[in-house]
Amino acid sequence: MLASDLRVALFSGNYNYTRDGPTQALNLLVGHLLDQGAAVRVYAPTTETPAFAPTGDLVSVPSFAIPGERGEYRLARGLPAATRRDLEAFAPNILHLSAPDFLGYSAVRWARRRGIPRVASLHTRFETYLRYYHVGFLAPVFIGIQRRFYNRVDCVMPPGESMAAVIRGWGVTTPTRIWSRGIDHDRFRPDRRDLAWRRSLGIADDELAIGFLGRLVKEKGLDVFVEVLAELRARGVPHRALIVGEGPARDWFQQQVPEAVFAGFQSGDDLGRAVASMDVFFNPSVTETFGNVTLEAMAAGVPVVAARATGAIDLVDEGETGFLVPPRDCAAYADAIGRIQADPALHARLGAAGHRKAGAYRWEAVNQRVVETYLAVA
């Protein structure tokens, strides 16, 4: 079988209605598959105001907004008759599931009855989100749902070895193949740094710009970010927080750190400029499966201070490209940031090493790995 023989049905809980790391990875993958001559059809919830145009053919699946604080995300109700008819007409020879939701479970059942091979990619640590929304006691239930789901496919594609170890700890026995992530090396590079742009935001050249990049949502560790900035102030470490991104928690975040610079949503070369203009990238999130933003900062030559958690531990070499800190240890985070601030030679060494390591992460190579996985499974 060749790549051009593949007929891939991709199921996702979000393909383009909200922009985040998983949606961008999935769209880039579909583009790569189409370039290889594969046929691809995507099944996912949609909205009337998508964040960006989808890559490939997107079939809208009926859905409802998730109740509570995260209403921007939607859940499909399963695999309704009209969607099943479309799927049967497409006649896939492999299914790719990107989320263990109602749609994913229904698609797995449909494929198992027909003997169609199934692969699943892993993008989100749903079980870690729960404590941020005061239902942490449900974590074992969510782990059980994911264990059952990933044991019903033929191959699981986590983004790194740390997540492969996590799901094995859950009791997932399905074989795994790593689907890492790539980076736009023209966009994220050290020479995008722009001191004039920083000054326009009110950041002085001698101020340590501590960067945050991503959707402003609670599960990104915003509470820890706030506490660490307070610790740095108490220690007299000069700094300004540079926040790049938007999200439902922006108002809360801005109230907690009113002295921070909120640059809003950035894209394209503007995003590359914003990241390269940071002095330290601080990522306290413990919910990442990979951490695209961490890799982007490394590519831009920015030293990283991150939680010692999935994603970051696959990317950050302790003391070489940045520092890994026990999650929620605010004093240790402040120690690491203060150490970088006080030692320009260390700052330069960490940034240069991160840039070199990020050079190995290229979209064409990592997406070709998915094609190879499809062919092996099929």
Image (cartoon, rainbow, N blue to C red):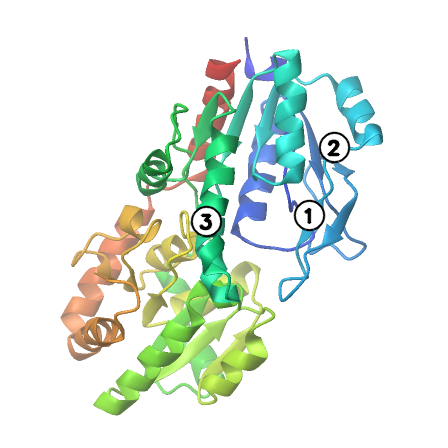
Residue 188 image position (x, y, % from top left): 42, 56
**If the image is split into quadrants, where does the N terminus sit?**
top right
Viewer-closest of 233 and 106: 106
Which mark identifies residue 79?
2
Q: Are marks 1 and 3 in contact (CB under 8 Å)?
A: no
Residue 148 image position (x, y, % from top left): 50, 32
The amino acid at mark 3 is: Arg
Answer with left or right where residue 239 lies relative to residue 27. Answer: left
Q: Spatial distance from mark 1 to mark 2, Cα to Cα? A: 12 Å
Find residue 325 and report its image quarter: bottom left
In the rendered image of this protein, does residue 167 appear above or below residue 356?
A: above
In the rendered image of this protein, does residue 288 appear above or below residue 79?
A: below
Q: Disc 1 designates what residue?
A: 75
Which mark identifies residue 125?
3
Q: Spatial distance from mark 2 to mark 3, Cα to Cα? A: 24 Å
In the rendered image of this protein, does residue 350 appear above or below residue 372?
A: below
The amino acid at mark 2 is: Leu
The residue positioned 28% from the left and 84% from the top of the image is 231
The residue positioned 50% from the left and 68% from the top of the image is 218
Viewer-closest of 278 and 77: 77
How many marks are shown on the rendered structure?
Answer: 3
Q: Spatial distance from mark 1 to mark 3, Cα to Cα? A: 16 Å
| Whether residue 132 can be seen here | yes
Label 2, residues with CA under 10 Å away: few <14, some 14-19, many ≥20: many
Extreme-top residue of the structure: 1
Find residue 11 and report its image quarter: top right
Answer with left or right where residue 175 lies relative to residue 38. Answer: left
Task: Say which label, 1 or 3, has the lower sequence index.
Answer: 1
The amino acid at mark 1 is: Leu
Extreme-right residue of the structure: 82
